[in-house]
Image (tube, grey):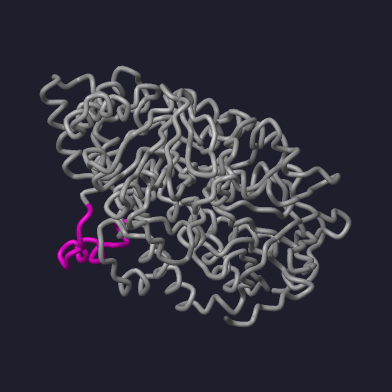
Amino acid sequence: MAQRLALPASLDVVIVGAGFGGMYQLHRLRGLGLSARIIEAGTGVGGTWYWNRYPGARCDVESMQYSFGFDEALQQQWRWTERFAPQAEILAYANHVADRFDLRRDIAFETRVTSAVWDAGRAVWTVRTDRGDVIEARFCIMATGCLSAARMPDIPGRDAFQGATYHTGHWPHRKVDFSGQRVAVIGTGSSAIQSIPVIAAEAAEVIVFQRTPNFSVPAHNRPIDTEYERHWKDDYAKKRGEARRMRTGILYELNDQSALVQAEAERRATYERRWQTGSTQFMAAFNDLILHPAANETAAEFVRDKIRGIVKDPKTAEALAPKDHPIGTKRICVDTGYYETFNRDNVRLVNLKETPLDHITAAGVVAGGVEYPVDAIVFATGFDAMTGTLTRIDIRGEGGQSLAEAWQDGPVSYLGLMVAGFPNLFTITGPGSPSVLSNMIVSIEQHVDWITDCLGWLRQQGHASIAAEATAQHDWVVHGMEVANRTLYPQAASWYMGANIPGKPRVFMPYIGGVGVYRDRCAEIAAAGYTGFVTGGPAQGAAAAE
């Protein structure tokens, strides 16, 4: 184990998190000549892909697009092996990036930030860690990720269970052998849909406890051949540029027709082509699937029919076919053999809508008064998305107000980049930005580039601080909700809305206006001298030096 990096008492910038956002931000800040360190709770880089090591974990964005575009040599030389990269390969890529740009020398691993307090008189943040570090920094950049605060469900008796327990978001850094075991999987979100087929191929028995079914489409994953790789690499710059203009930041075939224009047979043929192609591009089959209920229902019923055709037991098939939310309004999943897994003799589904989960005992899970004895429990119960990693840190801005207090009625932010009352604190892919509705690396690169340009502008102008104006923040939040309410997204009790966390305010957190539209707005604001932001004071310290 390498010796832990000693943190200096004073820095220009503290970055929290060594995922893709934190690593790229560190790289860019070095280019500005600023002193910066990353503080990372884990033992290595990778963020989401460091923590999420559950069986079957892989990205739902194609590998050739789920990668950095800022360095031509990097994107030409790195070789992906699969259309949808597995977790281990993405983690290897993250480590390659860290090594290639010599980032580790400025990362303090196995260190967790516990608090960050703004000193208005001196225009600095005082950052404290669980290792006893106290660092003063002019700027704090939160690269904590949107899906990093794992949620353990509050099920009575959970701690009484005598067998092994796992959460998909904090999987052991070793192979977990389920051979011969009876395994309960609680939850049927993305991580469950990816892991259940893999666990079922190994375990003696898998019992899936489902509260709410989710829509999933096949990945049709495959090895990447030389021709496909060259298709991307020969024209990467153009393709990256086109992706940055797409609503999701992902380049795929669009259809500018309504689903209601085509005759039923033709419409089903369109869906079938998308189904056979695989991936989330299924939702781009028509241009109004997230806008109009009737259009959405044609796609939803197509997928339900697919489930009914795959799953042999009619009752199980109906239980797996979602009917309580429009398709796509919860993040649509991408799977390899998920529905087929329920045809296995060693897999059964417990529908918690019919037999609610009562409690956990020392020997198993009780639902509807029936105890299911198991040797291990896998909690695939998701995350306190988008805000959890931030509110778990005691962040205090002007007047000592905590971020948790500022967000007690739901997260507010200007552009998803800054929060009013918290000067010099930036959030990479924070609530109010496209973030989880997009290719995260595209959104990360745009945010990091914007923040870096902003810090360079502050130095050039001689300003010590920048903060979001309350009015601009309010207007952006209202705009975000107006755009969201034009769609079907708010109809789902999703983690986009915070609905998976008891007591969390129901607010649609990401910005749904699209990556291209959002990018243009951010650029316009910067070009106009950062409208909606207020600056103050003469710059001091290392960051003021030209």
Q: How many marks?
A: 0
Residue name at image x 58 percent, y 68 percent: 26
Q: Residue furthest top?
A: 294
Residue 288 position within the rendered picture, expressed as x and y whole percent measured from the top left: 31, 26
Point out the image quarter for the C terminus: bottom right
Between 91 and 180, the residue placed more toward the observer is 180
Q: Which residues are magenta?
A: 221-239
Residue name at image x 33 percent, y 55 percent: 180
Q: Is residue 514 left or right of residue 390?
A: left
Q: Main secondary structure of the magenta part?
A: helix
Between 54 and 230, the residue placed more toward the observer is 54
Tell me if I can see residue 58 in this picture. Answer: no
Residue 71 position within the rendered picture, expressed as x and y whole percent measured from the top left: 41, 70
Residue 433 among magenta residues: no
Between 62 and 348, the residue placed more toward the observer is 348
Residue name at image x 78 percent, y 49 percent: 396
Q: Is residue 509 left or right of residue 175?
A: right
Residue 430 position within the rendered picture, expressed as x and y whole percent measured from the top left: 58, 46
Give the vertical position of 80 relative to 282 (above or below). below
Give the vertical position of 288 relative to 231 (above or below). above
Residue 40 position within the rendered picture, expressed as x and y whole percent measured from the top left: 61, 65
Between 67 and 334, the residue placed more toward the observer is 334
Q: Residue furthest right?
A: 121
Residue name at image x 16 percent, y 30 percent: 309
Residue 224 among magenta residues: yes
Point out the image quarter for the N terminus: bottom right
Tell me if I can see residue 485 in this picture. Answer: yes
